[in-house]
Amino acid sequence: MSGVKKLDSCRVLIVGLGLIGGSLAAALKARNGCREVLAWDRDPQSLILARERDVIDRAACSLEDGVADADIVVLAVPVLAMSAMVRDVARLDLAGKVVTDVGSCKSDVVEVARECLGDSLSGFVPGHPIAGSEKSGITAAKADLYEAHKVIVTPLPENTLAASQLVRSLWEGVGALVLEMDVEHHDQVLARTSHLPHLLAFSLVDTLAGDRDSQDIFRYAAGGFRDFTRIAASDPTMWHDVFVANRNALLEALDEFSEGLQQMYAAVEQGDSRAMTGIITRAKSAREHFTRMLESQSYLKAMSHQSSHTFLARSGGTATGTLRVPGDKSISHRSIMLGALADGVTEVTGFLEGEDALATLQAFRDMGVVIEGPHDGRVTIYGVGLNGLQQPPGPLYLGNAGTAMRLMAGLMAAQKFDVTLTGDESLSNRPMNRVVKPLLDMGADIETSEGGKPPLVIRGGRSLSGVDYNMPMASAQVKSCLLLAGLYAEGETAVVEPGVTRDHTERMLTGLGYPVKTDGNRVSVQGGGTLTSASLIEVPADISSAAFFLVAASIAKDAELLLTHVGINPTRTGVLDILRLMGANITLENEREVGGEPVADIRVKSAQLKGIEIPEDLVPLAIDEFPVLFVAASCAEGETVLKGAEELRVKESDRIQSMADGLNALGVDAVALPDGMKIPGCAAGAQDVFAGGVVHSHGDHRIAMAFAVASLRARDEIRILDCANVATSFPNFIDLAHSVGLNLSETES
């Protein structure tokens, strides 16, 4: 095929007018997607029905005539007939034409294509739409069958780029999401995700239908049984052909399933509650985890149909009442990691059920740790000990969780098995060299993508040696990563900090019986110890989440909020210190210690804030809270200056530039500095500090929530784009904000 044709100038021939071929023809016709829709089928009645239903423009008199008139030929015949059809088409003149198929098995048809297509192989691009129904034939054709459904294209090395692009545009033109996969991998994946479930459904229904109580079984079957066995109503001939065509891959999948079924059989037979719980909880969480992961399309290239969440923050709100924000994300991450590595059972309460923390939980399930929950913030972890983790079945997907990736890099570097740490599009663009380089010095074997970015490929079986590492910049994530690696290293691992950072890892290690030595700004552990179960880890409310409401109540008129059970670890209270320096009315009540972490109820009232030069020693203690502190500074009388916060450049977004751009868009003359920001503030008593308008969060949850708070002092509505990632750290932010008086809602756009 020479040149690049446009789909709208092409004649498309559909060979075979069953459900798949008929629906493709109907979709092309309904969308005016191509110049002309032709069809040929061995059954003349199908062609007559297709014309009567206006599914096609014209019926070809013969296969030869249809191919001669067409630019694109789509082979939509049954799987076992596909190879013979390729041979038939190969005998015709295919010069300048593109040929594709729709079969759910690729290896056999590709083998035949290579055997008989010759030079025309360059235009044969195999494909497989992941769509269908229990009905079949042209009468079941649906013009919307492919909308928002996946189509897998399996291009061959011999294909021209123009041919591949035209097949992609064919499917994209009917609303499908087009993905690419190699032929062998396609057949293995489909054997497990489609062919095996159909085989099991057919077998189960057949088995139960032969039971002597079959009438009662089917009469009283509940929804779950009906949902699972629905696919047993599919076309028997088609599925017989699929099972035959993909026999080897299907048998491999069936062997894997049989092994898993035997494990469950043994657990039930022996009354092994822990084994049963492990299988059930892993299955439930895996289903939920992969559903979230795939719905976000975070690691797929087909992004055109992804919805974008927009916050609508209207002016005129307030901030009054009592609330408890979700559990601390940093502590939630660490509770799963260290609870999994402890000997014994650990109960966690107050666990943050946000996507970041859930990704960490799923990663340890993938490594063989039995974890129950979360249920209303309660998690039960059956620890496997420091050396009890198992190799996961595939890469560990950590979503948007930078904390999880950096801390787990230290843990994974010392394991006996290889592992790959990966994440969503945002995490895949964040630098990891600041943990990778010191880990390499300890003897780890880690490979990154260009620029030191994820995925991290970590090779196991390496012996680590302790180091004495002087951190170039204060970072709790780097410190924790190295301390966790140090649990496995020979000798002492020490980290010297240039400034104070959060100490949750040290506190939790101590609570789990592992000695941690602190000498000024030097923290160290000795390798070779053990972690014992703490029985209970109570996660306090996250001060980083509370920060949005601390600022909200400070800048709103006549506001008063009580935030309960908030963690006030002295390495995290920079936001309180900075707001107090600005004149905020904040008091601590009911101070106490829970699980080794100090907590308190925080009362905050409206106040006229003053601009300040933020002390650099407070910067590491409030690094995550600066987006909303920039909003507070905009509402303060006089200039606020932040320096020494270059780490903000490498968070989920460049938080310095993202906030400066957003503030500028709302009428605030903020100036981005290389390591901070200058914000001029406002006149005393000014109410409308921000104009309305549109700002972009760049997928950064803290940017999104900060601008939501800004609406309290805005003249008009603020539209905040790309807010889907708020769920990573604060899953019920909108509900809580609305409950205390903010005029905030969400839409998809």
Image: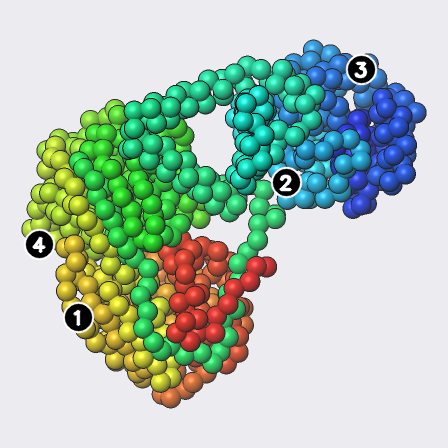
Identify the image quadrant of residue 105.
top right
Q: Residues within 10 Å of mark 4 (few under 14, many from 20)?
A: few
Q: Is residue 603 above or below residue 181?
A: below
Identify which amino acid the numbered label 2 is placed on.
His
- Residue 19: give x, y in percent of width and height: 74, 32
Q: Nearer the viewer, mark 2 or mark 1?
A: 1
Which of pointers 2 and 3 lies earlier in the amino acid sequence? 3
Question: Residue tagged by mark 4?
Answer: 520
Question: Residue tagged by mark 1?
Answer: 590
Identify which amino acid the numbered label 3 is placed on.
Asp
The answer to the question of whether label 2 and label 4 lie on touching residues, with beta carbons closer than 8 A, is no
Instruction: Classify mark 3: helix, strand or loop.
Output: helix
Question: Residue tagged by mark 2?
Answer: 149
Which of pointers 4 and 1 lies earlier in the amino acid sequence? 4
Q: Nearer the viewer, mark 4 or mark 3?
A: 3
Give the distance between the C-alpha atoms of the residues marked 2 and 4, in whole angstroms: 58 Å
Farthest-out residue, top: 115
Give the distance between the C-alpha atoms of the residues marked 4 and 3, in whole angstroms: 80 Å
Q: At x 31% / y 42%, what residue is drawn?
A: 372
